[in-house]
Image (spheres, rainbow, N blue to C red):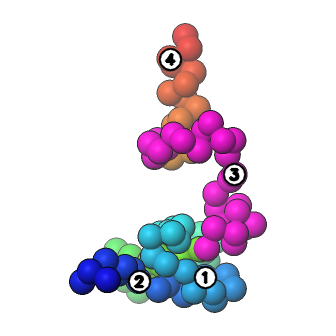
Amino acid sequence: LEPGFHQFHILIEAVVSTQSTGDKAIKKFIIRNIVEAAALRDIGEQSVYKNYVLPKIYVKLHYCVSCAIHSKVVRNRSRESRRIRTPPVRGPPGRQVQQQQKTNN
């Protein structure tokens, strides 16, 4: 084998802890608040510091293909649409619907 030919990273998968290669895994990056919205307001009212911002949780999840489909991270596509490799449009979910309505009018 040539040096550097079959180099890939083995990743531990998020759901069932299977090992999959890094290029094949589906990656999802999650940013959340440490506390939920209802408790955030209560903490803000009781806090001595008025401008304190609670830190967030940053997690990168790796899924194997079967677990990503099962947990609805990705959906299966038809054979023709699988050939389309351009990534989907990113943004807030409501914005895509508004853009489609503007283009139709």
Say which element carries label 4.
helix
Q: Earlier in the sequence, mark 2 or mark 3?
A: 2
Q: Nearer the viewer, mark 1 or mark 3?
A: 3
Residue nearer the viewer, 88 or 83: 83
Category of crowding for the residue at label 4, using alpha-carbon neighbours closer than 10 angstroms: few (below 14), some (14–19), many (at least 20): few
Q: Quadrant of residue 55?
A: bottom left
Residue nearer the viewer, 89 or 12: 12
Q: Earlier in the sequence, mark 2 or mark 1?
A: 2
Q: Nearer the viewer, mark 1 or mark 4?
A: 1
Judging by the rendered image, the residue that carries numbered circle 3 is 76
Q: Earlier in the sequence, mark 1 or mark 4?
A: 1
Q: Quadrant of residue 14?
A: bottom right
Judging by the rendered image, the residue that carries numbered circle 1 is 14
Judging by the rendered image, the residue that carries numbered circle 2 is 9
Judging by the rendered image, the residue that carries numbered circle 4 is 103
Q: Amino acid at mark 3?
A: Asn
Q: Position of residue 9 (x, y in %)?
A: 41, 83
Residue at the farthest top position: 105
Mark 1 near mark 3, Cβ–Cβ under 8 Å? no
Q: Amino acid at mark 1?
A: Ala
Q: Main secondary structure of the magenta part?
A: loop
Q: Position of residue 3 (x, y in %)?
A: 24, 83
Category of crowding for the residue at label 1, using alpha-carbon neighbours closer than 10 angstroms: few (below 14), some (14–19), many (at least 20): some
- The answer for how far apart the CA atoms under marks 2 and 3 are is 25 Å
Q: Amino acid at mark 4?
A: Thr
Residue 29 painted magenta: no
Could you tell me which residue is drawn at 34 percent across and 74 percent down? 51
Residue 80 painted magenta: yes
